[in-house]
Image (cartoon, rainbow, N blue to C red):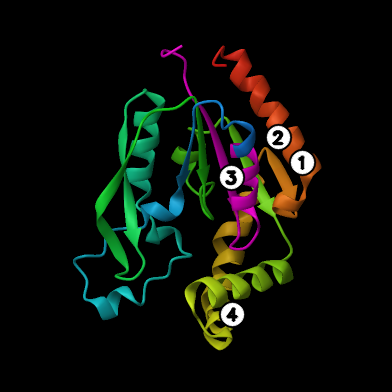
Amino acid sequence: MGNNRPVVIGIAGGSGSGKTSVTHAIHDVFKDHNLVVIEQDYYYKDQSHLEFEQRLETNYDHPDAFDTDLLIEDIEKLLNRQPIEKPIYDYALHTRSKESEHIEPQDVIILEGILVLADEKLRDLMDIKLFVDTDSDLRIIRRILRDINERGRSIDSVVEQYLSVVRPMHNQFIEPTKRYADIIIPEGGQNEVAIDLMVTKIKTIVESDNIV
């Protein structure tokens, strides 16, 4: 079993699209098997060399914000059944934490994030590519609720950031990656039929590799 290549599932979509809900739904089905979730958000670049004021100007919705080379390197290690030290991002300090999380290789790897389909090398490592496609009005409502309730932000700051950064970056970088998806899931975690079909497909791939 240890020689079989793990299955890699990429789950992309805009902020507030419901990709995390889709990830959790798949995770719940496979929780009895060896599965690991790798969040692209953990792979924001280290900014310790910058002054704090400079870090505040980081555009987290731009492809350049991510250390994609490190992410690819870690996925390749997991594919070769090697453990990784997954970075942890400190959002209070706006840079990478000195801590990391030890991750053992697993049979199913879910790679989740807004721009996981943007890089060709990263896409080439995936067996299944998903794009969670949700209307922009629902995404902004979810983002407002999340940022106010969980991050203590004002509605004015959330809306200003959405209009100045999140929306243009979504249209320029995230939305175009939909073309690379094998499956597009409308309405995210609410779409139980699409998730059931997805789970069935993953099971087929996993079982065909004699992993389960």
The magenta segment: 1-27
Q: Which residue is mark 3?
A: 11
Q: Are discs 3 and 1 less than 8 Å apart at CB?
A: no
Task: Give the residue at x 37% y 23%.
Answer: 81
Q: Residues within 10 Å of mark 4 (few under 14, many from 20)?
A: few
- Callout 2 amino acid: Met
Contact check, label 2 and label 1, Cβ < 8 Å? yes
Q: Secondary structure at mark 4?
A: helix
Q: Nearer the viewer, residue 181 or 48?
A: 48
Q: From the viewer's perspective, is residue 53 above or below residue 32? A: below
Q: Label 3 to label 4, Cα distance in Å?
A: 24 Å
- Three-letter code for the amino acid on which mark 4 is drawn: Leu
Left or right of 87 in this view: 133: right
- Find numbered disc 3 in the image and state the secondary structure of the residue it sits on: strand
Q: Which mark is residue 198?
A: 2
Q: Which residue is mark 4?
A: 163
Q: Tell me which amino acid carries mark 1.
A: Ala
Quarter of the figure with the C terminus:
top right
| Mark 1 lies on residue | 194
Sequence-wise, the earlier of marks 2 and 3 is 3
Query: Spatial distance from mark 3 to mark 1, Cα to Cα?
Result: 13 Å
Distance CA(mark 2)–CA(mark 3): 11 Å
Magenta stretch encompasses residue 81: no
